[in-house]
Amino acid sequence: MWVKSSYSGNGGADCLEWAPSTAMASGRVPVRDSKTPHGPALSFPTSQWVDFVSYAKGQRV
């Protein structure tokens, strides 16, 4: 199941989605653009995704 990011802007029109159940089961975080749900998805190792989110929040990794 895909979930929209709580940080998506523009009233939800610019949304990043991720699949938490897949992430928990596989150790990889799949992400996609909600405007193209049948388009490609990227998949990141959990540790790299955590680093990316920390960086995006302006925190040091």
Image (tube, grey):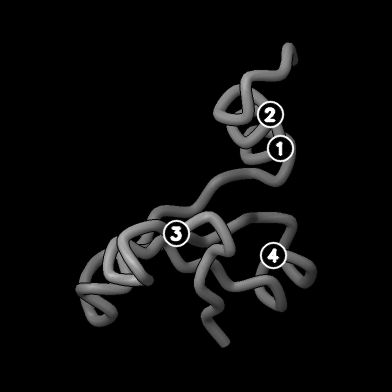
Q: Position of residue 9 (x, y in %)?
A: 39, 57
SS class of the residue under badge 1? Answer: helix
> For the residue carrying disc 2, how many other residues have a C-alpha within 10 Å: few (<14), some (14-19), or many (20+)?
few
Residue type of the residue flagged with mark 1: Val
Which of disc 3 and disc 4 is earlier in sequence? 3
SS class of the residue under badge 2? Answer: helix
**Residue identified by numbered label 2:** 54
What distance separates the C-alpha of mark 4 from that of mark 1? 12 Å
Residue type of the residue flagged with mark 2: Ser
Q: How many callouts does the rendering have? A: 4
Residue 23 is left or right of residue 55, and the answer is right
SS class of the residue under badge 3? Answer: loop
**Residue identified by numbered label 4:** 23
**Residue identified by numbered label 1:** 50
**Residue identified by numbered label 3:** 8
> For the residue carrying disc 3, how many other residues have a C-alpha within 10 Å: few (<14), some (14-19), or many (20+)?
few
**Number of the front mark, 3 or 1:** 3
What distance separates the C-alpha of mark 2 from that of mark 4? 17 Å
> Looking at the image, which residue is at 52% across and 61% down?
30
Mark 2 touches mark 1? (CB < 8 Å): yes
Residue 10 is left or right of residue 46, and the answer is left
What distance separates the C-alpha of mark 3 from that of mark 1? 17 Å
Snapshot quadrant of residue 41: bottom left
Residue at the extreme front of the image, as rendered: 11
> Looking at the image, which residue is at 53% across and 55% down?
7
**Number of the front mark, 2 or 1:** 2
Q: Quadrant of the N terminus?
A: bottom right
